[in-house]
Amino acid sequence: MTKSKTCPICRKPRSEEFAPFCSARCRDRDLASWFNEGYAIPGPPANPEDAVRDED
Ligand SMILES: [Zn+2]
């Protein structure tokens, strides 16, 4: 059983530089999909202004 060497995002031949993706664009797109799925990593608020407003 051989693994396909294609980008999981767009199915184009992947690049070794961005493996397993074909480009930085697809890599970023994969990361974005993870965030959308709710896998956001712990960290400071994305919008500091919103946190400041909380004190009002
Ligand atoms: Zn791709």
Image (cartoon, rainbow, N blue to C red):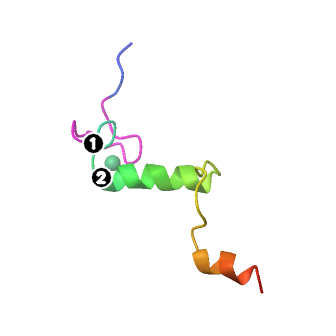
Q: Amino acid at mark 2?
A: Ala
In what quadrant of the picture does the C terminus appear?
bottom right
> Between residues 26 and 56, which one lies in front from this camera angle?
56
In what quadrant of the picture does the N terminus appear?
top left
Which residue in the protein does label 2 denote?
Answer: 24
> Between residues 22 and 34, which one lies in front from this camera angle?
34
**CB-based contact (under 8 Å), mark 2 and mark 1:** yes
- Label 1 secondary element: loop
Q: Earlier in the sequence, mark 2 or mark 1?
A: 1
Please name the residue shown 58% across and 49% down the image. Answer: 41
Please name the residue shown 57% across and 68% down the image. Answer: 46
Q: Amino acid at mark 1?
A: Phe
Q: Position of residue 13 (x, y in %)?
A: 25, 39
Looking at this view, name the residue that lies furthest to the top.
1
Dividing the picture into quadrants, the one containing residue 21 is top left
Which residue in the protein does label 1 denote?
Answer: 18
Q: Position of residue 33 (x, y in %)?
A: 53, 53
Q: The magenta stretch spans which residues?
A: 5-18
Around disc 2, counting alpha carbons within 10 Å, would you say few (fewer than 14), some (14 to 19), or many (20 or more)? Answer: few
- On screen, residue 45 versus residue 4, left or right, reads right
Looking at the image, residue 16 lies above or below residue 48: above
Looking at the image, residue 23 lies above or below residue 2: below
Q: Position of residue 47 (x, y in %)?
A: 58, 74
Please name the residue shown 30% across and 37% down the image. Answer: 19
- On screen, residue 52 versus residue 47, left or right, reads right
- Label 2 secondary element: helix
